[in-house]
Amino acid sequence: MTSLSSASGNSTPQSDLSSILKEQAALLAELNRRRRTNLLSGYKPYSKQKEFHAAGNRYRERLFMAGNQLGKTLAGAAEAAMHLTGKYPDWWEGKRYDKPIVAIAGSESYELTRDGVQRLLVGPPMTEEEWGTGYIPKADIISSTRRSGVSGALDSITVRHVSGGTSTLLFKAYEQGRGKWQANTVDYIWFDEEPPEDVYFEGITRTNATQGLIAVTFTPLKGMSSVVARYILEHSPDRSVITMTIEDAEHYTPEERQKIIDSYPAHEREARTKGVPSLGSGRIFPVAEELITVVPFEVPKHWVQICGIDFGWDHPTASARLAWDRDADVIYVTTVYRQREATPIVHAGALKPWGAWLPWSWPHDGNNDMAAGPNLASQYRAQGLNLLPERATFEDGSNSVEAGLMEMLDRMITGRFKVFSTCGEWFEEFRLYHRKDGKVVKERDDVISASRYALMMKRFAKVKADAAAWKFHDRKVV
C-alpha cells in the first residue's frame, strides 16, 4: 500500500534530515576551504610577534631572534603576505604598503627555502592542488614560475594587491652567494635563518633606493657572527632586535615548556629556548644567566665599592661599578656605562655622578703617551675622576687577562659573582664573549674588561665616606 506522503510527493522525515546533514556538510566544507585558502585572515600574533611587526613602522632593519618552534618564521610569513597583498588587519601597527611591491624571501638553500618560506607562504611544495593554503590567500596568487633542478621549488610568484596592481615575490637561497641576490630595486626582503654577511649587505643594497624594509628571523645557533653583532651590539636608530623566549610562546603549557627546555643539551639551551646566541664550547663564561642575575637592591653602607674603566674610541669606552660584600665574599656589578667616540670630558661627566669618592681601576694603556697631550689617565684625573695611582694588577704585580677571567668564572660558578639585572650592556657582552682557536676574542668585551680591572684591584675598594647608604638607580647608558 502506497503511503500518503509518498503518493503526494512529500519527503519523509528521514530524507529531510539527510538533506539537512548534506547541506551542513557542504557548508562546513566550504567554510573549511575558505579558512584553508585564506589563512592570513585568521592570523592572531602573540605579543612578541606583534612587537616585531610594529617595529617595522620605526626601523628599517629588524631582527626577530627566537628559540626553535616559537613562531618566528610564521610571523615572517604572515607579514610578507600582508605587504604583498596590501591586506592589513585592524590591529596592525607596522609599516603599510599602499601599492604593489617587489620582495625577496629566502633561506640557506633552495630546499630549505622551499620547505620553510615557500611552504608557509604558498602551501605544501609537493602538492600543487594545495597551493593557496599558505599565508598568501589562494585568490590572490595570480601566477608562479618554477625553479629548475629543485623538485617543488618556486622561483617567483605574482600576487594581487588590493590597490589593483600586482606584487612580485622572488625566492632566493644564500648558497647562491651575493651575486644571485642582485636584482632591480626591491621594497622588502625577508631572510629566514641567519644570512652570511655578504648576502645580508647585498639585501640592504637592493633596498637603498626605496628605503625598503629588511626582516630577519632566526634562532642564533651560529653564535657570535657579524650579523648577530650588528643587531645586538652595534646600536643604530635604523635597527631593532626583538627576542622571543619560550616563555613568550603562549601555545605551550608550563609543563610543556620545561620538557622542551630539558630536552636540549646545556650548551644549546639558551639559543633554542631563549633566542640567545649559542657559543658552544667557545663560550668564556659557560654559566646560565639566571645563576648570576639579581634584582637591584640598596647596597649596604658597610660594603666597599670600586669602579673600573676600559679606555676606547672606535670601540667604546666602558665602565663598571662593583660592590663587595666582604663577609660573604660576593662581588656585585651594580652599574655600567658604555659609549664610543667621545672624549674624556664627556665620559668623566657621565661617570662622576656615580660618586666622587669612588676609586677607579684602569688598564695599562692609560699610561701611553698621547701625541696631542697628556696620557689618558692624566686627562681623567684632570676631569675629577679618582683614578688609582697605578694601573690594574693583581696583588703579585701580574695582570694576566686569563687569570682575571678565571677568577670571574670561578666566582660565578660558586655563587660569588652577581650582576644587577639592569646592567643590560654587561649581559650583552656576557652572552657573546667567546674564544676562537682557544684564544679570547678581544671584541665587544668593553664592560666585561672594565669589570675585570675593578675585580683585580678590589683590595683598594672603599666604603662611602658618609653614613647614608647610596640608593641604586638605573642610569640610561648611551
Image (spheres, rainbow, N blue to C red):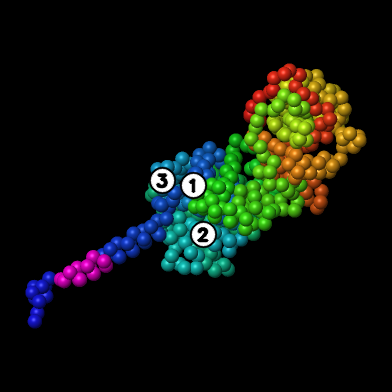
Residue located beneath label 3 in the image: 89
Q: Nearer the viewer, residue 242 or 431?
A: 431
Q: Check disc 2 and report the residue beneath it.
A: 118
Indicate the quadrant containing the C terminus: top left, top right, bottom left or bottom right: top right
Residue density around tag 3, few if under 14, some if 14–19, many if 20 or more, within 10 Å: few
Q: Position of residue 168 (x, y in %)?
A: 48, 54
The residue lying at 90 percent from left, 37 percent from top is: 398
Q: CA distance from mark 3 to mark 2?
A: 22 Å
Question: Which numbered marker is on residue 46?
Answer: 1
Q: CA distance from mark 1 to mark 3?
A: 14 Å
Q: Secondary structure at mark 2?
A: helix
In the image, 167 versus 447, the foreground residue is: 447
Residues shaded magenta = 11-22
Against 41, residue 153 (above or below) is below
Measured as percent of width and height from the top left, residue 319 is found at 74, 31
In the rendered structure, which disc, 2 or 1, sits on the residue that comes first in sequence? 1
| Position of residue 143 in the picture relative to residue 254 (left or right) | left
| Residue 306 x, y percent position in the rendering | 77, 28
Label 2 crowd (10 A; few <14 / some 14-19 / many >=20): many
Figure quadrant of residue 418: top right
Amino acid type of disc 3?
Pro
**Residue in front for this viewpoint, 300 or 403:** 300
Q: Quadrant of the N terminus?
A: bottom left
Residue positioned most to the front: 327
- The residue located at (9%, 76%) in the rendering is 3
- Chain-order first, disc 1 or disc 3: 1
Q: Amino acid at mark 2?
A: Gln
Instruction: Kindly tell me whether residue 451 is visible in this rendering.
Output: no
Q: Residue 407's x, y, as percent?
A: 81, 41
Q: Is residue 142 above or below residue 99?
A: below
Depth check, mark 1 against mark 3: the one in front is 1
